[in-house]
Structure formats: structure tokens, C-alpha cells
Image: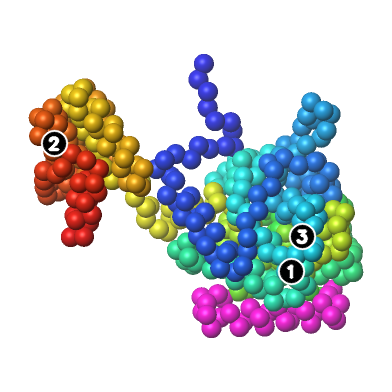
Amino acid sequence: MAFNAPRGTADILPDEQPHWELIRRTAASVAERFGYRRIDTPAFEDTSLFKRGVGEETDVVQKEMYTFEDLGGDSLTLRPEGTAPVCRAYIEHGMASWPKPVRLYYVEPMFRYERPQAGRFRQFHQFGVEAFGDTSPQVDVEVIELGWLFLRELGLKGLSLRVNSIGDSIDRPRHLQALRAYYAQHADELPKVDRDRLQRSPLRLLDSKEPESQALAERAPRSVDYLSDANRVRWDQTLRLLDSLKSVYPEMDYAVDHRLVRGFDYYTHTVFEIEPSGAQGQSTLLGGGRYDGLMEALGGQPTPGTGFAAGLERLVLNLRKQTPAESSGTGVQVVAVALGDAASQKVVEIAAALRARGVATVIAPSGRPMRDQLRFANSLSAKYALIVGQKEIERGVATLKLMDAEGGQSEIGLDVHAVLAAIGQRAAH
């Protein structure tokens, strides 16, 4: 019997790790530069957390959640998104007493039963940020700037930013009523999947991937036309703040997209997505927005929030297209080559001493000719080979070979201090 990874999952092999490490490292660096601190939540939560937070009528809750009953009879769900769990942690651990806004970020796996395709998996990874406790448009723009800088520092180019305002709980019903009336006049033109969505989630028709629905969405009622006077002022201020970022990020040429909505019920006010130029909403790298009612819906005190999430798998795909792969070498500095049993014992001792002092050291497979052991050192892209044989032990020396095109070598003392000194001397040159 041959086993394969489950459909919709993927192994991240050693040669693929450099891009992943770059993303994780850059995410932490940029988030912490803005004052965000890391949080990790459990891989599974009470199912009702997502039903209440994400929305009963969303595709995620209706079709895509991995839900199971544990041995105690509790209904649990593998985390399909990161915001609701972070809100739950905020409530549970009394973060409401922390200085506002509370800024948090995470890099974690998520799980959704989706149709696998390029950049989309059933187990996938997200980098997300959440800011709680501040209603200011300035925090919305901070989150957008953080996402833009993150993608820029990854080396991605040709990005486009789309923004929209979908209003609040007062604006939304009037817009939804207009959408239902509009689409009811064109129901015969809708594909079946969107006719089913019309009553339970008409906003989803605006970002439908069906060609017929896309044409209708271009003429659909716009959410900004249903904003209250106060929310219109708020939206205008958001756009002015975005304009102010252009002096630092001249490439940030955002566009207001009246079809832009997000897939979860908890969003309010500003929503945004960043994608590669020309992607037309089909390859979003990073997206998010404000969700001022979510904390209260989950049983906490009314607390405004805003944030985003970025899919790491899709980022890796775009990095491969736009940037050369980093070295896939092992990072090994020294390969220790032993010729004979007595040499093997000494090599184990020296290799252990080197590792304890921070030098990446691997011992070549024993019992092989020196030529094969040096070939092994080359396969690891090691900088040095430390060669020890019976004669070297008798004389108290070792041979340090530089594993580059020149292949120079020198005789050094048979102890860790001599090796460290020789490596340091060569590095200095």
C-alpha cells in the first residue's frame, strides 16, 4: 500500500523552505515594527464560535468547515480562519483592560474543505493581524500600510490595492434591500449557485466568480451610496489618509472597487484587498477590513476591530514567479571526515564541540573512502571539510580543506580551538 498526502494538502520540502522562512521572518519583522505582538490559538475551537462569528449563511460555515464530535460529545471545528479565535482569546484573557488599541498578529495553519487549485489548499497557512479597541480610520489605514509594506519587503512588485466601504449595521440593511430588488429583476440571468445565494447572502453576488453574475454586479447598487452622513465622512477621511501614504509609497495607487466585499458576515466599514496587478480579484494576496460588531456577537463587550489575513501558499507562488529562489543549501559549515575507527571517535568529539559553540557541523558517513566523504561534503554545500586519519591522530593534527573552486587546505591542531581559529582566520580574509 502506498500512502499520499491527503487531497488538498501538501508537504513543504526542504528546498521549498527558504521562501516560507522569508515570509515568516518578514511577517514578524514588519508586524512588530508597527507594535503588534504574536498570539497563537488552538487548531480547533467550539463549532459555535465560527457559526456565530463567521456567519451561519456563509459558504465557509455551510460547506467548508471540518467539524467533528469529540469523545466527550462536544462539537469542535478545525480553525477555518483566524479572527474569531483571536477575538475569543481577547475576551477570555481579559485583554479589554490592556492599553488600546491591542495589536496582535499570528502565523498559523487553517482548514477548509475547498476545491483544491493553484494557491488554494484544504490545509493552508495565514499571516494575520488584528487591532482591537480603536474606531479611528487611522487604524484601518495603519493595517493597510502594514500589509502593503509586508508584501513590498517580500520583494513582490506590481501590486494593486482595492478598497471599499460596506457601511455598518444601519447602512447595510438598506443596501441589502436594494441588492435584492435589483437581482430579483435579473434572477433568470443568474446561475443556479447565485440564485441560491440571493436570499441568504446577496453581498456574495458582488464578488461571484460566475461570468453572468460579474456582468450584473457592475451595474448593481453601490454600498457607498447607502452610507449615513457620519459614515460618509468616515469613508472620505479614510481615503485622505490613504492619499497621505503616497509620499512614502508612491507605487500605492489604490482604486475604489464598489464590488469589493469580504466573505464573512462580521465585516463593516472599510474593506480592502491587495493583489498582483491584472489579477482582477482572482489571486488576492492579502485582504481584510473592519469588524466592529464581532466582539459583541461573541459575548464580549462592544469592541471595534480591524485586521487582515494573507495566505502563505499564494505568496510562495508569487515569490517563485517574481524573485529568484534563495539558496537551498543546508547551511552546514563543516563536514568532519574520519578515516578509521580511532579517527571516528575523535571526530565525534570535535564535531560535538563545534556544534556546542554554534558551528553547523555534520559527520560524513563512516567507513567510506575519503573521496566519497568529500563528495558528501560537496553535496551539502559545506564550506570546510575537517579530515582526520590515524596518522593525524598520532601527530595531533588535522587537515582543514576549503570546499570551494580553489580547494586550498592547511594543517591545524587537532582540537576545537584550532578549528575555530582557522575558520575565523579564513572568514576574515
Indicate left or right for 60 with 387 as reference.
right
Disc 3 + disc 2, Cβ < 8 Å: no
Judged from the image, the secondary structure of the residue bearing numbered disc 1 is loop
In the rendered image, the quadrant that contains the C terminus is bottom left
Reading the image, the residue beneath label 2 is 396
- Distance Cα–Cα, label 1 vs label 3: 9 Å
Q: Please tell me whether the stretch drawn in magenta is mainly helix, strand or loop.
A: helix
- Distance Cα–Cα, label 2 vs label 1: 63 Å
Q: 148 or 128: nearer the eye?
A: 128
Indicate left or right for 283 with 177 as reference.
left
What range is drawn magenta here?
226-253
State the mark number for residue 95: 3
State the mark number for residue 99: 1
Q: Position of residue 41 (x, y in %)?
A: 69, 47
- Of the numbered discs 3 and 2, the one sitting upstream in the chain is 3
| Residue at 43 percent of width and 55 percent of height | 321
Residue type pointed to by label 2: Gly
Q: Position of residue 212 (x, y in %)?
A: 71, 55
**The image quarter in which residue 319 lies:** bottom left
Judged from the image, the secondary structure of the residue bearing numbered disc 2 is loop
| Residue at 78 percent of width and 37 percent of height | 76
Q: 338 or 36: nearer the eye?
A: 338
- Distance Cα–Cα, label 3 vs label 2: 62 Å
Q: Position of residue 251 (x, y in %)?
A: 51, 75
Can residue 57 be spotted in the picture?
A: no
Can residue 254 be spotted in the picture?
A: yes
Circle 2 packing at 10 Å, graded few (<14), some (14-19), many (20+), is: few
The mark lying in front, picked from 3 and 2, is: 2
